[in-house]
Image (cartoon, rainbow, N blue to C red):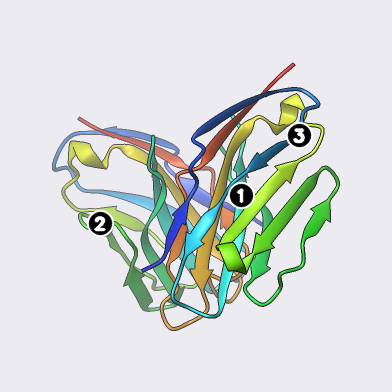
Amino acid sequence: EAQVTQNPRYLITVTGKKLTVTCSQNMNHEYMSWYRQDPGLGLRQIYYSMNVEVTDKGDVPEGYKVSRKEKRNFPLILESPSPNQTSLYFCASSGAAASYEQYFGPGTRLTVT
Amino acid sequence: AQKVTQAQTEISVVEKEDVTLDCVYETRDTTYYLFWYKQPPSGELVFLIRRNSFDEQNEISGRYSWNFQKSTSSFNFTITASQVVDSAVYFCALTNSGGYQKVTFGIGTKLQVIP
């Protein structure tokens, strides 16, 4: 089954404790992206990757890191999480570029206390 | 910079009514792509439609239709004879086809269909 998986689905952590949210897709997609969803703000792009070792900032990259060492994986790293990073996070992938439809993961609800 | 505006944050309609969700976009690119996604109460995001900037034909898929007008920079979505299952948050999104490939979403329109 074609899918995007994210782990964990739910996470409660404390300020400053490094965490990684994993994202994996099995569709051989080149484009992958991370978004955060906040009430009243919609979906905002954090980082995206057009291929292995090619990443770029979205609109809200501060406080996040990403890496793309393999085509299928695109982890999101919060090296020192803060309460304002409490949000619902979605990973997505699409065929060759952002101009194709995106397939979204189920979301990760992160709470930073 | 690109921008997507969904001015209607919440809409309520009675079942079987028609409803139109507005989407206005801004971009300096001549080649761009517009999308609509649906997020039902269960939370997943589901692709509905993709349209490129050179294709202004309206599209109909069952009870759903989309009206793309470059002259007004709008890509509106109409649901005909709404049903309770249409209750969801609907997002409009924009991207280009150039060197950078940011995707910009609107803030979404929450549609509630009342039985």
Give the secondary structure at mark 1. Answer: strand
The answer to whether residue A99 is above or below residue B5 is below
Please give the name of the residue rendered at 50% of the width and 42% of the height, measured from the top-left corner.
Answer: B108
Task: Choose mark 2 or mark 1, whichever is in front.
Answer: 1
Q: Residue furthest right?
A: B62
Q: Residues within 10 Å of mark 2 (few under 14, many from 20)?
A: some
Please, what is the three-letter code of the amino acid marked with disc 1?
Tyr
Question: Horizontal placement of A34 versus B78: left or right?
Answer: left
Q: Give the labeled residue for mark 2.
A: A64
Marks 3/2: CA distance?
42 Å
Nearer the observer, A84 or A2:
A84
Identify the residue position indicated by label 3 in the image: B18
Q: Which chain does the residue under circle 3 lie in?
A: B
Q: Position of residue A72 (x, y in %)?
A: 51, 67
Asked whether, in this view, residue B107 is left or right of residue B86, the answer is left
Residue B30 coordinates in the image, percent (x, y): 53, 80
Residue furthest bottom as drawn: B99
Compare residues B59 and A22 and report the one nearer the observer.
B59
Q: Which residue is mark 1?
A: B37
Q: Amino acid at mark 2?
A: Tyr
Residue placed farthest to the front in the image? B71
